[in-house]
Image (spheres, grey):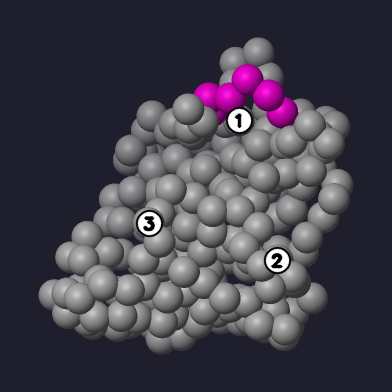
Amino acid sequence: AQSVSQHNHHVILSEAASLELGCNYSYGGTVNLFWYVQYPGQHLQLLLKYFSGDPLVKGIKGFEAEFIKSKFSFNLRKPSVQWSDTAEYVCAMNTRSGYGGSQGNLIFGKGTKLSVKP
Amino acid sequence: DAGVTQSPTHLIKTRGQQVTLRCSPKSGHDTVSWYQQALGQGPQFIFQYYEEEERQRGNFPDRFSGHQFPNYSSELNVNALLLGDSALYLCASSLFSQGVGETQYFGPGTRLLVL
């Protein structure tokens, strides 16, 4: 079955520390991959996405993610976190059909809560 | 540019009742998807509407139904409410694409409590 796994439930970092959040997916075909972020009191916002091309994608607020097909992974990174990065980070995917279009349903991981200490 | 809006923000119902949730997509979008998010879980796909028809459906019973209007707004209806239907219901909108993919943008959600 198609699934997305985020193995870190809660990550606590100090400001200026580097961040890497894991995301692995289970699907043998072509996928689109997304990272969403939910800041406290706000709704889900798109952080970055990968459809095709350069496997290293850059998003808002200095975040980037690398798609490694051989590892079925799409890990999120940031070289130096700030207190304002405290949020829930959710990885998601959808699959691509044979004609190239994508399936409508996003499949989400359970999310990783990031707490950044000032 | 207004984003995705949902109403109401909160709702309390009792078992057996019916509920209707509403969603207005982001300007320029024509596709609406609905998700259910239980506490501590990631969102689960309910269905997606495009051109006023259900384009795709997740693993939810027929008690969950929807509608899309000509202005692209959408409703989610749940009949015969169960305690387990208590959740955050998220609406996402996107622009339909025959290409490689669509990006879904989410609204703030409607929190439903079934007593």
Q: Say left or right for A44 vs B32.
A: left
Query: Residue A84 placed where, x, y %?
Result: 48, 59
Q: Which residue is mark 1?
A: A74
Count every numbered label the image shows and give the total: 3
Seen from the viewer's position, the closer of residues B66 and A14 is B66
Q: Say left or right for B88 vs B67.
A: left
Above or below for A87 versus A1? below
In the rendered view of the protein, which quadrant contains the N terminus of chain B? bottom right
The span shown in magenta is A24-30
Q: Which mark is residue A98?
A: none
Disc 1 and disc 2 on one polypeptide chain: no
Q: Is residue B17 magenta?
A: no
The reply to whether callout 3 and callout 1 are in contact (CB within 8 Å) is no
Q: Amino acid at mark 2?
A: Tyr
Instruction: Measure how far apart labels 2 and 3 are at the Cα level.
Output: 20 Å
| Residue at 20% across, 76% down | B16
Q: Say left or right for B114 vs B106.
A: left
Above or below for A48 versus B52? above
The reply to whether callout 1 and callout 2 are in contact (CB within 8 Å) is no
Residue B110 position by quadrant: bottom left
Query: Residue A4 placed where, x, y %?
Result: 48, 33
Q: Which residue is mark 2?
A: B50
Q: Which residue is mark 3?
A: B61
Query: Residue B61 placed where, x, y %?
Result: 37, 56
The reply to whether callout 2 and callout 3 are in contact (CB within 8 Å) is no
Taking the image as drawn, is residue A105 in sight?
yes
